[in-house]
Amino acid sequence: MKYLRLCLLNMLLIPAIVLAHGPSRQKVVQEIEINASADKVWKIIENFCSIEKWHPGIIKCSADNGSEIKSVRTIEMENGEKINEVLFKHDPEGKKIQYGMQELEAGRIIKGLPIATHGSTISISENAGKSKVQWKGAFYRSFPGQQPPPELTDEACIKAVTKLYKTGLDNLKNIAEK
Amino acid sequence: MPYLVLLLFVCWIDGAYGESYAYITNQGDDSVSVINTNTNKVIRTIAVGHRPAGVVVSNNGKRVYVSNPESKDISVIDTKTLKNIKTIKMGSGPLAIAVSPDNQSVYVADWYEDSIFIVDTASLSIINKIKVGDSPSGLVVNPNNKFLYVANRDENTIMTVSLSENKIIDTIDVGTAPFGLALNIERNELYSANVRSNNVSVINLDTKEITNIAVGSFPYAIEIDNANNRLFVTNQRSNSISVISLSEMKTVKTINVGEYPEGIDLHPNNIHLYVANWFDNIVSVIDISSLKVIAEIEVGEGCRAYGEFISH
């Protein structure tokens, strides 16, 4: 029992210790024009967990406190990887959602999305009845050392995040323009 | 004719001593943008090493030292010619950079090797290496060059290094993931921006007593405003500057700036505060009496300007 407790304690401590990310932070910005009002687009994305409906790469989502600030959602990717994300800002007026990835467990590298400390913002603006949706994010590669294998480099991470944002925005456009 | 000579001479004096420049590291462009702070225009872009982040201007204004974490070196810029005059190989991950008050030494924190490299500015070579804590990220030297304070991000401590003995003489626990440091001589206080606990630790250097002050999300760097007894703190994730009153020991105001504000430095005129916004590639200029953004200057990709980036 004592050992078990010690083990559990260690498991709690490790993520706090290993947040070293020597590499440089990267950024990605994707935008799309949608032939629909900003209100209509906002309705589709406003619920923090609605991402499971409008993003084809995310098959499941559950949140512990809906779309309230600090609510934590768990999204499941097509490949089964699960990621926890915290809601920082939910602004219906400005039509903006800001969230960030919870720190990953020590040594974890997400398959297909090898990033860490991901902070992200989705915002909608309107001009002449059309909306522009911008999705942008900042992140580090999760490979901590100096010589990442090709699938874990900064470039690979930028590619993966760009794909994540782009497939989401493309499908958002499809749904909103229906 | 003598008048013209006199006029030229006056202009030259003015040019040499009357102007301050801001040297902004652009991490995505491998360059430094040089801003003339009289006009708030970029007058030159200088190529440096790979992924430049840290920067410090020597106290005599003659040189700028830039850390390049991914080419693992520092670039030395001559401010008269605005040329990169030397590249000095460092350890595995040079980031925070500071200069001694007498301009004879440059201190470089290496986050992979958990060490501080000391560079002699006459020979431009490494003369010493001091082991410190886990992932050293912030550096500040005291004015008599006796002590170097180091923020160890991944062990939540500030270490005091004795520069005469080249060893650690004190270790203090602060908030989680301390990054930027600032030293206030007038109050004998040291401040750390704690990225993961979203606060600033105020360390009383006489009593070693610590007070934590809540700021925005992911605080990064700190600037002291002695005239008004305040601190300015960049909050990366809140896209804002927290204004801390040191008499009240709390955040009294928040100024919205660009996205991911990082490096912050007060102009020697004590009026203008310069902030590099990493995501937007823009430097915001804030009037510290009105606490309003009065200018925005477009610089290079991923500006960071982590350090004392304005010449005095």
Image (tube, coloured by chain):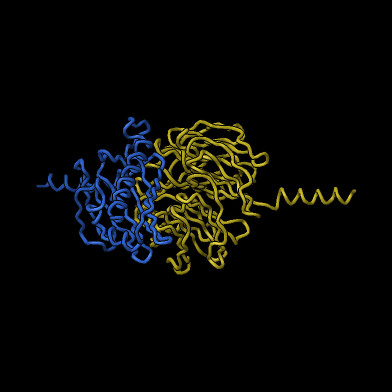
Chain colours: A blue, B yellow
Return the residue nearer the eye: B159 or A57.
A57
Q: Is residue B59 left or right of residue A6?
A: right
Q: Is residue B77 above or below residue B277?
A: above
Give the quarter of the image for residue A64: bottom left
Q: Position of residue B21 (x, y in %)?
A: 62, 49
Whether residue B210 is visible here, answered yes or no, is no
Q: Is residue B34 left or right of residue A173?
A: right
Give the quarter of the image for residue A89: bottom left
Question: How many marks on residues?
Answer: 0
Q: Is residue A17 left or right of residue B45?
A: left
Q: Position of residue A122 (x, y in %)?
A: 35, 55
Residue placed furthest toward the right? B1
Q: Is residue B161 above or below residue A45?
A: above
Q: Position of residue A157 (x, y in %)?
A: 34, 39
At 46% from the left and 67% from the top, the residue drawn is B253
Q: Position of residue A127 (x, y in %)?
A: 43, 60
Q: Is residue B287 above or below residue B72?
A: below
Return the residue nearer the eye: A113 or A30.
A30
Whether residue A119 is visible here, answered yes or no, is yes
